[in-house]
Image (cartoon, coloured by chain):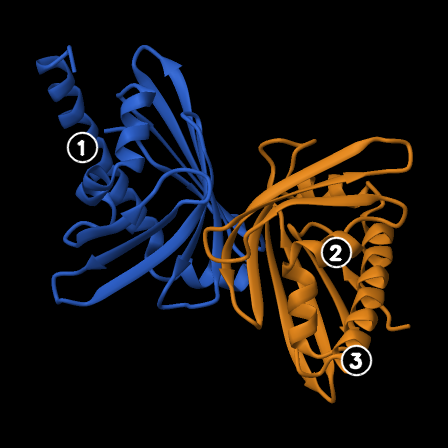
Chain colours: A blue, B orange
Amino acid sequence: MAETQFTAEAGRQDIIITREFDAPRDLVFRACTEPDLVAQWWGPKGTTTAVEKMDAKPGGTWRVVQRDTEGNTFAMHGVFHDVTSERIVDTVEYEGMPGHVVLETETLEDLGGGRTKMTDHLVFQSVEDRDAMLQQDMKEGMVGTLDLLAGVLENLKTQKQAAPAR
Amino acid sequence: MAETQFTAEAGRQDIIITREFDAPRDLVFRACTEPDLVAQWWGPKGTTTAVEKMDAKPGGTWRVVQRDTEGNTFAMHGVFHDVTSERIVDTVEYEGMPGHVVLETETLEDLGGGRTKMTDHLVFQSVEDRDAMLQQDMKEGMVGTLDLLAGVLENLKTQKQAAPAR
């Protein structure tokens, strides 16, 4: 399975996560923007995710609620600044840390041969905000989450092969 | 005239600008969110500013076009993440640098006695993006711009005193 690269240099305000997927860019874009697909992979393993809203266009808003196996819920919301087939820019506010907003830039690079490189760039309002997020096992959570995304993409590829005239 | 504080530490991804105004918070909020008022002060001295859109609510979009004395135009746009009487969070994309997005947090602190402290916190996607902005005489431009805002606030205070039953 492809390796997730997770970069958080000391003293900086950002985190960069990259991952290559064995799936074409249009499928990765769909998996990142369609509510029913996002619900299948977003969040650490073992959580269920409800996508209350995901209006993936400039000015569109989104809200997601995750529930862990003990019934605890974690909600987050934001707004889309820009959405193209190659790049999604949005804001993220964890409702457990109200007032702390993250600027997220998700780039989807077509590597050819039906492969796609995703780069998720998170910029925090302060180094402290970023480090607080890192302390919540964020790296392990992201790796598991992107493994789930890879599984969703495999399913989408199978569906596409089964129904090419979609 | 009150002094504008401009902080851009080496190697960081952000800029913090603070300024105290001799005006109550509700007037500062109006001057920062109502299109016809924003047009009166935003931009370096000598530029005219057209506020094409400014829908100051979560998910609202905005676009501003500035024209200098030589007829050059500078456009920027973004989307509001959050808008309260105390805090405005939005994104900013200078259209001359497409794809480079800034996360802006504008805090309005009521100092009492009809005075307000504004803190404008700009977070860039990279140190390079921030430094490129600094090289464009941004500091001088911001100081002049906030002097203009102070003038607009003086006018608003006069209008308010003339028509208290508004």
Image quadrant holding the N terminus of chain B, namely bottom right
Residue B106, image x, y percentages: 63, 63
Q: Name the residue under label 1.
A: A152
Residue B134 in percent (x, y) is at: 78, 45
Residue at point 34% right, 54% down? A138
**Residue A90 occupies which quadrant of the picture?**
top left
Q: Label 2 sits on what residue type?
A: Ala
Residue A126 visible from this viewpoint: no
Which element type, helix, strand or loop, lies under badge 2?
Answer: loop
Is B69 in front, or is B141?
B69
Q: How far apart are marks 2 and 1 (CA)?
A: 43 Å
Which image quarter holds the C terminus of chain B?
A: bottom right
> To which residue does mark 2 refer?
B8
Q: Which residue is depicted at the point 16% across and 16% down?
A: A166
* Quarter residue A31 falls in: top left
Residue that label 3 marks: B162
How far separated are the C-alphas under marks 3 and 1?
64 Å
Q: In which quarter of the image is residue B133?
A: top right
Q: Are marks 3 and 1 in contact (CB under 8 Å)?
A: no
Q: Mark 1 lies on which chain?
A: A
